[in-house]
């Protein structure tokens, strides 16, 4: 029942649109406009019939039967106009009498009883019809003014037959055929609809109202007379229905594919500020209860540290010429867990370059992030172990470096004791001795602090770092070792070098490892030729380059890349992890580490990092 009545209403509206199109083209404009209005009125009547069949409320049934007389009045008017314009026939007084009676029927429907059909509806009878469906039929005493409605129908039928008779007498064979077809179809509709409605209201038959289906012969008659343009319009309508079905199936297939890939498709209506997602339970937004999702409510559910960053990225994408959005963010779910998401979208703009909507996809990357964090933690453990191992190799030199200020402190303290033991104490001399003690103590503290930073196992912190200071700090750590091996340092630092964003301790580790390797590479070089070259310089507009060179034997050309592979080593006691860890650190800082052979001898290790000119270290 629902399908049939819905199809009829849709067909009526389709006919209405078709005739409105023909009317707009200026082809028999008034006739086509009248028919379009009649089709619209019929669609409304059909819809009201369907609602009446499905209602379980007496009040709603009474309301529908009261208001249904308004589209009936419109339908009567449209039929009269169609006959006058298409047939150019029909007596005017019959037309006015029909309209008057139908208008009186509408007024009586609002002023007497609950509607024109019933004075009072006392109940709704549930009746099983075709296919086992159940419909509602009103019951109650009829309105005494009910006869006005059928009377207007009889006058309208007389008007149509009068017009057909006039057309039959004065027109050609085609005109007579049209007179028979249209007058018979319209008369059949009027008599069938009115008679059936009267029988249903009187309780003689148990059936739904079929005013809509009684109008079907007129549709058939019109379809017979329609032009090729009308037929083409029907074909287009059918193609549109097929396209809608295919689109619906395509959307269903897309949703299945998206769920299989754990993707969530979403759309942000920027004008109405409403986000719709394929994720029905709204887990994507960390919202437990179904509710309207606006952009602000989405932002409020983000992890606090991600709030401003995501907002800035979205605002940037809303600018014409960009239109692309991508971000990673965290959301605290209703169960208290933190989930990571990667989201990408594209903006659609109107002709005025104003953003209309954003279409995008989001995927839960929590497991990937957890794996990355686990790998990062293991990498940090390995990096710390490498630092400790390197410092262990420098233990002798570091002990010597620390022994010097401690010996000086001891010597000065003993001297002060001797001065005090003599009795005649020279306070100025004692003051100088104390100054020397303080100075040497600070020197020892600096050595210990440098060692403490390298030995400490803490979180990686990316902050503005001055590479020149990093170089100087590392050279202080290895100063004693360089002196013990008779290595001369050639230092060339770019004083205008911008800061880089990184972890100071990890960058110190990279330099320390490269310098230690350079020192070891020159172990068989003549003492007078042992030179260490350390250079910093700008590389382009946004890179800083650090180079560490030696005058050792160099690196075989086939091993220039292999030396960065894990466990590859040319040392007897080496593990082959130092350079791979250095490259991992530099890569994590967004940079590159590579090696070249020096001229005429030795090797040079270079690494470059992105700079941050706006930052100061």
Image (cartoon, helix red, strand yellow):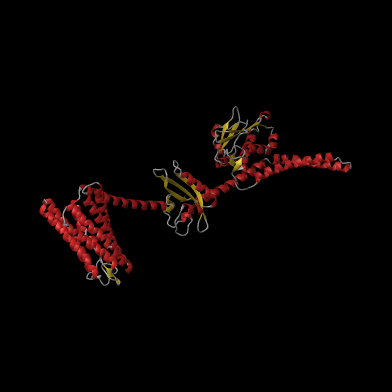
Numbered marks: total: 0
The quadrant where residue 5 appears:
bottom left
Q: Nearer the viewer, residue 207 or 513?
A: 207
Residue 154 vs residue 136: left or right?
Answer: left
Q: Nearer the viewer, residue 538 or 307?
A: 307
- Does residue 33 appear to the left or right of 313 in the view shown? left
Taking the spot 65% from the left edge, 45% from the top edge, the residue there is 455
In depth, the one of 433 and 236 nearer the eye is 236
Q: Is residue 574 visible?
A: no
- Point out residue 263 in the picture as x, y percentages from the top left corner: 43, 51
Most extreme residue toward the right is 423
Decide: is 352 above or below 128. Answer: above
Q: Is residue 436 left or right of residue 130?
A: right
The vertical placement of 496 against 139, above or below, is above
Check the picture and name the quadrant holding the N terminus: bottom left
Residue 482 percent across, percent down from the top left? 68, 35
Foreground: 427 or 510?
427
Q: Is residue 345 visible?
A: yes
> Whole-percent x and y of residue 369?
52, 49
Quadrant in which the C terminus is drawn: top right
Residue 401 in which image quadrant: top right
Whether residue 191 is situated above or below residue 410 in the rendered picture = below
Instruction: Measuring from the top left, give residue 165's x and y in whole percent.
Output: 12, 57
């Amino acid at each position: 029942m629902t399908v049939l009545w819905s199809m009829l209403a849709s067909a009526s509206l389709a006919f209405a649109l078709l005739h409105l199109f023909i009317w707009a083209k200026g082809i028999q404009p008034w006739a086509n406009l009248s028919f379009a209005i009649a089709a619209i009125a019929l669609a409304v009547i059909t819809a009201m019939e369907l609602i009446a069949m499905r209602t379980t409320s007496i009040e709603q049934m009474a309301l529908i039967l009261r208001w249904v007389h308004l589209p009936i009045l419109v339908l009567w008017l449209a039929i009269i106009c169609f006959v006058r314009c298409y047939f150019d026939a029909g007596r005017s007084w019959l037309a006015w009498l029909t309209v008057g009676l139908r208008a009186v029927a509408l007024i009586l429907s609002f002023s007497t009883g609950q509607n024109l059909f019933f004075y009072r509806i006392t109940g709704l009878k549930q009746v099983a019809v075709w296919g086992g469906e159940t419909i509602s039929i009103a019951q109650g005493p009829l309105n005494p003014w009910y006869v006005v409605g059928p009377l207007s129908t009889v006058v309208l039928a007389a008007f149509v037959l009068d017009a057909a008779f006039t057309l039959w007498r004065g027109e050609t064979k085609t005109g007579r055929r049209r007179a028979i077809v249209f007058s018979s179809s319209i008369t059949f509709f009027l008599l069938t609809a009115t008679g059936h409605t009267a029988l249903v209201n009187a309780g003689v038959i148990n059936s739904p109202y079929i005013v809509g289906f009684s109008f079907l012969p007129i549709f058939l008659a019109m379809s017979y007379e329609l032009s090729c343009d009308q037929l083409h319009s029907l074909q287009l309508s059918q193609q549109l229905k097929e396209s809608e079905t295919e689109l619906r199936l395509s959307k269903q297939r897309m949703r299945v594919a998206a769920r299989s890939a754990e993707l969530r498709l979403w759309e942000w209506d920027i004008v109405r500020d409403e986000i719709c997602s394929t994720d029905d339970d709204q887990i994507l937004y960390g919202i437990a209860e179904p509710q309207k999702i606006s952009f602000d409510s989405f932002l409020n559910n983000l992890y606090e540290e991600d709030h401003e960053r995501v907002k800035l990225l979205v605002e940037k994408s809303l600018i014409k010429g960009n239109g692309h959005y991508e971000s990673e963010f965290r959301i605290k779910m209703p169960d208290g867990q933190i989930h990571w998401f990667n989201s990408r979208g594209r903006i659609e703009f109107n002709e005025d370059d104003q953003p209309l909507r954003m279409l995008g996809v989001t995927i839960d990357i929590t497991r990937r992030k957890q794996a990355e964090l686990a790998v990062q933690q293991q990498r940090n453990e390995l990096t710390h172990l490498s630092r400790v191992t390197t410092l262990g190799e420098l233990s002798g030199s570091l002990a010597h470096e620390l022994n010097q200020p401690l010996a000086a402190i001891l010597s000065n303290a003993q001297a002060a004791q001797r001065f005090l033991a003599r009795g005649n104490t020279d306070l100025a001399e004692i003051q100088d001795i104390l100054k020397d003690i303080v100075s040497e103590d600070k020197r020892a503290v600096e050595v210990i602090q440098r060692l403490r930073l390298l030995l400490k196992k803490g979180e990686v912190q990316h902050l503005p770092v001055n590479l020149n200071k990093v170089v100087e700090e590392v050279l202080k750590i290895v100063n004693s070792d360089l002196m013990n091996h008779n290595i001369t340092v050639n230092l060339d630092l770019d004083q205008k070098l911008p800061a880089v964003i990184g972890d100071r301790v990890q960058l110190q580790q990279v330099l320390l490892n490269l310098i230690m390797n350079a020192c070891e590479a020159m172990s068989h070089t003549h003492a007078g030729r042992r030179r260490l070259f350390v250079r910093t310089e700008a590389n382009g507009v946004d890179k800083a380059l650090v180079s560490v060179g030696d005058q050792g034997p160099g690196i075989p050309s086939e091993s220039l890349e292999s030396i960065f592979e894990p466990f590859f080593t040319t040392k007897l006691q080496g593990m082959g992890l130092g350079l791979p860890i250095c490259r991992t650190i530099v890569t994590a800082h967004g940079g590159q580490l590579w090696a070249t052979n020096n001229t005429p001898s030795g090797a040079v290790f270079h690494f470059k990092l992105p700079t941050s000119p706006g930052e100061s270290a």
